[in-house]
Image: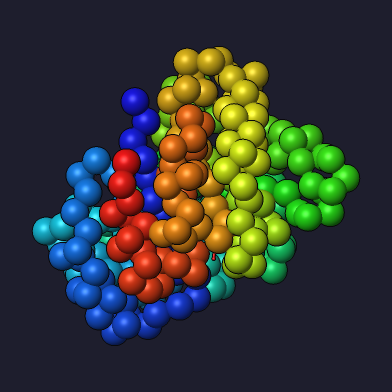
Amino acid sequence: MRKILIAGNWKMNKTPKETVEFINAIKGRINREDLEVVMFPPFLSLTSALEAIEDTNLFIGAQNMYYEDNGAYTGEISPKMLTEIGIKYVIIGHSERRSIFKETNEMVNLKLLKALEHNITPIVCVGESLKQREELVTIDFIRMQIKIAFKNVPREDVKKVVVAYEPLWAIGTGRNASKTTAEEVCKAIRGLIADLYDEDTSESVRILYGGSVKSSNVKEYFSQPNIDGGIIGGASLNEDFINIVNFDI
Ligand code: PEP
């Protein structure tokens, strides 16, 4: 049984003070032991966020990390730094990292391996552009992203990885993928992992959908057999996040 994971990706929003105010405002209204609810504030707000979630069943993750423990990498944050403050989740290869900051599939792979080495749960994002969808190469493109991301990941570690299907055309656009499209691609991703490893292994991997999820459409995604939760961007910044997390099963 795969536990549903709801990841709130705050992107570059909320100062440390705003982080604490927001978590204090919502924490008493979220109480789902059946779900894993993780919020991803900016790096500078992580410590305040960790303090604010004490005595709740919420978790805090990082939106990114580098693939070395330390060194001459100006502006980067290492997994060693994240684990020392108590971070147990990291988003890897978000489409904004790939498109704006030019992260390659090879970097995504190195980050994934490094997160596993440090026992941080990686949420690896994959997804096609609108052009790729229109050219009918969605699955080929995602196969390549998955294949490179999982390079050198041993079979026993695969179940620790979370994959997020985030079609680029649905992120921050208000144009969400239909439940059928989202399920189709998440099912294909599970199939790709089965091809790389085996069916039992692929059945243990959580696959999320992300792209304009709101409380009004969350249930249709989470009721799909191959969708095990979601990444929520815009709607994780306001009270709609409470309604998303408190969705009726
Ligand atoms: C995201 O940032 O990963 C995301 C899914 O954003 P939004 O929900 O705003 O589309």
Q: Quadrant of the N terminus?
A: top left
Residue 120, can we see it? no
Residue 146 on image: x %, y %: 65, 36
Q: Quadrant of residue 183?
A: top right
156 vs 74, left or right, is left
Q: Quadrant of the C terminus?
A: top left
207 vs 4, left or right, is right
> Residue furthest toward the right?
135
132 vs 81, left or right, is right
Residue 150 on image: x %, y %: 60, 34
Residue at 49 percent across and 69 percent down: it is 234
Q: Is residue 141 above or below residue 151?
A: below
Residue 142 on image: x %, y %: 71, 39
Q: Is residue 178 above or below residue 23?
A: above
Residue at 67 percent across and 48 percent down: it is 127
Count how many numbered circles sit on residues in the image: 0
Residue at 42 percent across and 47 percent down: it is 219
Closer to the camera in the image, 92 or 58: 58
Residue 128 on image: x %, y %: 73, 49
Q: Quadrant of residue 171?
A: bottom right
Closer to the camera in the image, 133 or 46: 133
175 vs 114, left or right, is right
Instruction: Give the colouring mode of the picture.
Output: rainbow
Residue 73, can we see it? yes
Closer to the camera in the image, 30 or 153: 30
Residue at 54 percent across and 52 percent down: it is 210
* Quadrant field for ligand 1: bottom right
Q: Quadrant of residue 170?
A: bottom right
